[in-house]
Amino acid sequence: MKVLKTHQTATTKEVQDIVTKHDAKKQGGLDFEDFLRLQMELRKGGRGFRQSPAKVDSSFLTSTDTTLVHSISDSEKKAYVDHINMYLDKDPILQRVLPIDSSSNQLFDIIKDGVLLCKLINVAVAGTIDERAINMKDKLNPWERIENHTLCLNSAKAIGCSVVNIGTQDLGDGRPHLVLGLISQIVKIQLLATVNLKQTPELAELMDETEEFEELWSMPAEKILLRWMNFHLRKAGHKKTVSNFTSDVKDGTAYCLLLNQLAPESCSLEPLRIEDLFERAKAVLAQAERINCRKYITPKDLLDGSANLNLAFVAHLFHTRNGLTQDSEKYECAEILLDDEYNEASREERMYRTWINSQGTDTFITSLFEDVRDGWVLLEALDKVAPGSVSWRSTTKPPVKSPFKKVENCNQVVDIGKRLKFSLVNIAGNDIVQGNKKLILAYLWQLMRFSVLQLLKDLRLHGREVSDADIIHWANLKVKNAGKTTRMESFKDRSLSTGLFFLDLLGAVEPRVVNWSLVTRGTTDDDKRVNATYIISIARKLGCSVFLLWDDIVEVRPKMILTLTASIMLWSLANKVTKAVDSSASLGKWAGAVTKIEATNKLGNSLRTSA
């Protein structure tokens, strides 16, 4: 083979030869492992290819001990392993592997079948995964493992995790930095789940007289925790404001004062007399131990300013002793939380927030109505859905302090929507800047719908526009051809509440995915709920990106029904394309099965990113 000189441009034929030679698995291209091997060869003296790829030991690439340029924190690993041992110790399926030894890399082997991660997601947000959809045999084949990982990643995405750079292969290989990154997000979601006005209405005590209720309602949980800390620190006479969980807490002062405010009978201010910061940290955490509030953090973590572990420590402290009044008369505004308008807005906020985060935008949002007000994240989402639609030269990147620049960004958001033929009557950029929830939700629904329909259009022959009627017709035809009699008349069809049509549809696109012995007739409310939770989990197990809740199906919410049906259609069409590609490759029985699922997942991710 021709040796290329440094900086010499390769011809197309030379590049093809290089790829062919290093395609160790003969799959028509380079996977990540082959690419790394090629890169290493290129770096050996900067030129040449002296060793056959088949002879290169690739164990370092797939070893759970290998992190390449990535490193993991032993403290974080121990904290998360302890968390898993505590919350899943009673689980009958995991009894054979728990407790996990936090001093070893045992965690990264145990998660390889996907069961533990699925269980952990359900601890974080109960009912996210119907556990009947998890493959839980003692020995799972490669197909079943990938199904579990697909279910895990789609479910993690649905509860608010960022999984853009994590694939089923990463979980199957137990790559430490990616596994810990995912677990840290799941644990964080669990710990912050009740840090909001709905779950903890006594947080209304943090509001001052000039503050609007909606400001605290829409505030991200992390900011609420900081505000809660500063509320107590002000009562303790502390003048410095804590604005982060790193540098502002490293010296232990804030924690010492906070613990003294929450439990003066057990926690004194004596640690503040200690000048050595490490010894002070030990003394502060010893006081937290006295009131059973020391979890997740060590003196070294405190001194190092570990953001994740400090956040976990404060969240646990908040759950255990928040020090807020229990006098219901002091927070009458909490009654607003029962208002249907707020509950509906909260439901849709969750769906659109998780959907935007799933698109691979650089900005990860935690509070939809707050985070979109400068227009930037909406522009990022538009660029993912309609590449090239954003004029980046005319935008202002965060932090956007000028109100006029925010309006400029949001005006472009509205202009692009009009070009994409959204219905935007009476919507202006300033409405987004002002946080008009109704108009923001209306815009995002059209953006999400456009994204799904565009993906379907790209997969259909001739790129024909896809209408709601096309989706309904496709679904009915699939079910009919599978020999079933259920039918959908529209996305408002009340018969859909039983869930039977969607189970028939899922069974039609992939016969092996539905365990019919678990399906009910859907005659009672409980039967409908059971079917609906099962539908969502097996759809995610296939690889569908769905963000609805079980009651969206039972109550037949048309928008959610459309996105569910379209997601199943998208998966089916993408899988059809993948099968056509696979049929031309000579792969072994299991290799073919595994590649098929992986290719479908990769295709779905690339389509979601490029559409």
Image: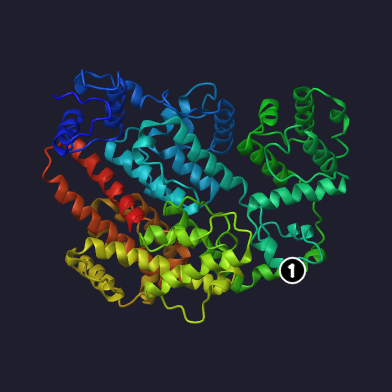
Q: In the picture provided, is 278 more to the left or to the right than 108?
A: right
Residue 376 rendering spot, x and y as whole percentages: 51, 59
Q: Residue at x 40, y 31 (%)?
A: 174
Total label count? 1
Q: Quadrant of residue 345?
A: bottom right
Q: Residue at x 41, y 65 (%)?
A: 448
Q: Quadrant of residue 556?
A: bottom left
Quadrant showing the C terminus: bottom left
Quadrant showing the N terminus: top left
Q: Residues within 10 Å of mark 1 (few under 14, many from 20)?
A: few
Label 1 is placed on what type of residue?
A: Cys
Q: Residue at x 81, y 39 (%)?
A: 259
Residue 19 rendering spot, x and y as whole percentages: 19, 33
Q: In the picture provided, is 180 more to the left or to the right than 42?
A: right
Q: Residue at x 57, y 28 (%)?
A: 78
The front one of 47 and 417 is 47
The front one of 208 and 561 is 208
Residue 542: tell me if it is visible: no
